[in-house]
Image (cartoon, coloured by chain):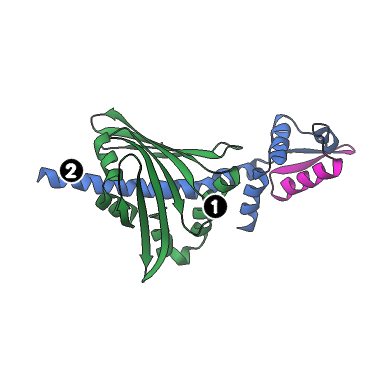
Amino acid sequence: MKLRRDVFQAIADPTRRTIITLVAASAMTPSAIAENFDYSRQTISKHIQILTECELLKQEQKGRKIYYELNPNGMKQIADFIEPFRKMWDDRFNSLEAVMKSKIHEHKK
Amino acid sequence: MEQKTKINATEGKQELTITREFDLPVELVYEAYAKAELVSQWMGTRVIKLENRNHGSYAFETSHEGKVIFKANGTIHKVVPNQQIVRTFEMENMSIGVQLEFLNFEKVTENKSQLTIQIIYKSEKHRAEQLKLPFAYGLNRAHNKLEQIITHSK
């Protein structure tokens, strides 16, 4: 539960969202990511760390360099996150449909 | 299978859209929102007040074992029968804040209709709070009954 909440907090931050968008296009090194921002390398590293901990990004070692790329499992968690909310509305609307259908039924009697 | 209820929550936005197709004429879907006794039945909440008119207001309250577990209220800004309701919605004692809702009722065929609800939150953070709510409840199956009540009362 803790982890999933964090995933949601992770994407609530605009800088982290931008990082996700950048990395989604192609795997990038931390310095290549940092070049896109005016923030310090340290700040960007912190964001990358949070995204990695939330399993939205994953590391890949290529030679001596570390690349970050999107972690599809983490992205799926975000989709799953919305599912209970969708289910809640689905149940509620099913109930609306049932109530109104029984009303039609009464009319016909 | 195509899902009847769809949620569109674009990242980076403070709004979301809920769409649902009903096997009901549009007039009946609208009526389900316009009449207190019907709202009470399908939402599973007590409707304390529902003035479905321009500049009207409404209030819901749900109790469980004698304790009030859910209170919500809002003002109804605009009503176009069988077409649109524009209103605010706020759950009391919650961090989600006030939200603005545009409910659009559309006729698909004589017996089919579509409801589109666009909800605008104060910020993206407030939207996240809303999305989290059923998620947290969904985790604890032991509180099934409570979940059921909350599920049915937003």
- Please name the residue that numbered disc 1 is placed on: B132
Residue with the most extreme bottom position: B66
Tell me the element at label 2.
helix
Tell me the kind of residue under disc 1.
Lys
Q: Is residue B58 magenta?
A: no
Asked where in the image residue B123 lies, by quadrant, the reply is top right
Mark 1: secondary structure: helix
The N terminus of chain A, quarter of image? bottom right
Write down the chain letter for disc 1.
B
Q: Residue at x 41, y 47 (%)?
A: A89
Q: Residues within 10 Å of mark 1 (few under 14, many from 20)?
A: some
- Residue for badge 2: A104
The residue stretch that appears in magenta? A38-65
Residue B150: x and y in percent read: 42, 58
Colour assigned to chain B in the rendering is: green
Residue B64 in percent (x, y) is at 37, 67
Coordinates of residue A28 in the picture (x, y in percent) = 79, 34
Which disc, if any, is residue B78?
A: none
